[in-house]
Image: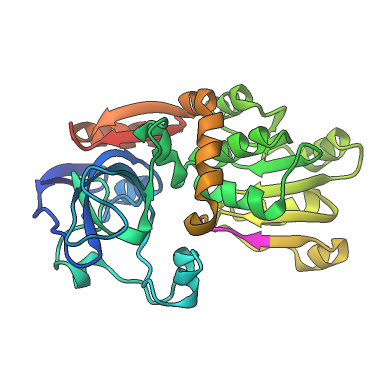
Amino acid sequence: MKAVVITGAQQCELADKPQPIAKDEWVVVEIEAAPMCTEVQLYRKGEHTDWLGHEAAGRVAEVARPGKVKVGDRVVVMPHFGCGRCELCLSGEHIHCRQGLSPRGSVGPTVGIATYAQFCSKQDWLLVPVPEDISIEHASMACCGLGPTFNAMQRMNVTATDTVLISGLGAVGLGGVINAVLRGARVIALEGHPYRAELGRSLGVERVIDPADPDKLKIIQDLTGGRGVDKSVETSSAETAAGFLVQAARPMGQVASVGWGGPMLARELVGKGLTVHGVWHWNHFRDTPAMMQTIRRSRALLDKFITHRFPMSQVRDAWELQMTGQCGKVILDPRQ
């Protein structure tokens, strides 16, 4: 099979790799849509790796035994590999598993991890069925496109009475806009890139504020009648972003951090009585029906959110585009 390999700083190629095989609970999935995410950072730095991609949707190509899926099933491939035995995995929180497995140790030494590839290997319990009325492309947004911020909105119980602040309108933050808008919330965002700011507005952001604006806190206070925002989501990973969300929050508000940025302000966090949520992904054991309904209801928004599609043979062009910031979510098609 073909898979993407980084060969140097902003250099990559398609390489021939062994196709994964099904074994025990490990299933082979033919990838039809591979959303692009943080791998662009590896491309920029030139880190030599063939472990590229952690999001995918496609069709089951091979199974070793009867199980949770069968050949031909359309599925979303959940990111990462839980052990399947610990209390976190058994409760659907595999993303936090500390005993995670890998296809390299379970199925073969060199195959199955990447999703910038024609096939991948995944435990059958980490595959989410895609209903017939949902396209594979839209279903693939259940990974990082919608997934982390979906969980943030669930945990904060965002409703139509809330003003939600989203820090960063990259691919994850834009998904957060969709999740908040679908819940009827009023959305404010922090973003300095003109393209992303405009895309955010087209998805339903009421006001986009440049994070470099020295008056940004005053602007938010004015927009909320001096109260502060009810709930906020940090997606930018900027060093000062999480601390600013604490400043912008109303007393007894909530802050969710999806980004992996800098510290929060403990004194103000305590003084305001804020609730803080660390969010990485979502619980597919519990919330798959809600996620699929979210995707159904957001079709028109997802069509705006997914701004570009590339055959995997043009992955370099896709990465070059991502580095400009002139895009929303970008999807690779490994079949091309």
The residue at 10%/52% (across/down) is 17
Viewer-side residue, 46 vs 3: 3
Q: Is residue 280 magenta?
A: yes
Residue 71 visible here = yes
The residue at 40%/45% (across/down) is 37
Screen quadrant of the C terminus: top left
Image spot of residue 251 (x, y percent): 87, 55
156 relative position to 307: left or right: right
Could you say which quadrant of the image residue 50 lies in? bottom left
Q: Total number of numbered labels?
A: 0
88 relative position to 222: left or right: left
Extent of the magenta region: 277-281
The residue at 84%/33% (across/down) is 223
Image spot of residue 150 (x, y percent): 58, 46
193 relative position to 99: left or right: right
Image spot of residue 311 (x, y percent): 23, 30
Could you say which quadrant of the image residue 133 lies in? top left
- Principal SS element in the magenta part? loop
Residue 49 visible here = no
